[in-house]
Image (cartoon, grey):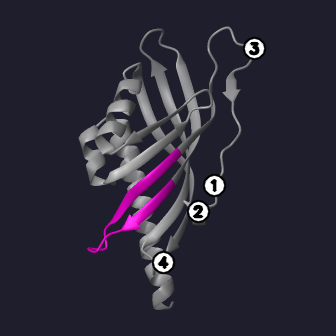
Amino acid sequence: MNDDRLAEALDELAVRRLHHAYADIVTRREWAELHNVMRPTCTLDLDLGDRTMRFDGPAAIGEFIGTELRRFSFFEFVILNSVVRVDVAAGTAGARLYMQELRQNVDDGRRTDAYGVYHDHFERDADQRWWIARRRYGSFSRTAEPGSDVDQDVFPLPIFPLDQL
């Protein structure tokens, strides 16, 4: 194995560890820990299928997610799959993270699910530490409201090229 391939593999592992750390933080609802995985300037652009929003910085991102999760007595963030492309020389990476939210509503005890994809831009700092620098999230399915004709509301799957994140 040559040094370039080894460097790429180690950088990809570091990026995947950030994804897993994020999933752990959100499942545990420990918003202050977002500062350990996101740059202070990290932005999150959300397309929820029926509305869009933007948040700047880990504190604002955590506050938004925390407020949204109050309606669930049970919540787990599950990574379904991810694809990572690392540019070792530039110290950047792009990744697509497919996820599912397993949830139970506080108000009616109903089990609900949401599926989506994060498009992430990562940056490596001078100390060789990787950070989430920018995120785009797109919903592509979630449990429909009671009385709907379908079980899941489905939205177009958002896909952005990894090298353009």
Foreground of the two, 109 or 164 = 164
Residue at which label 4 appears: 8
- On the question of residue 139 being in view, the answer is yes
When asked about the image quadrant of residue 129, the answer is: bottom left
Residue 160 circle label: 1
Residue at which label 2 appears: 164
Quadrant for the C terminus, please.
Answer: bottom right
CA distance for labels 2 and 1:
7 Å
Tag nearer the camera, 1 or 4 = 1
Residue type beneath disc 2: Gln
When asked about the image quadrant of residue 147, the answer is: top right
User: In the picture provided, is 152 more to the left or to the right than 123?
Assistant: right
CA distance for labels 3 and 1:
31 Å
Q: Earlier in the sequence, mark 3 or mark 4?
A: 4
Question: How many neighbours does mark 1 have within 10 angstroms: few (below 14), some (14-19), or many (20 or more)?
Answer: some
Q: Position of residue 104 (x, y in %)?
A: 47, 21
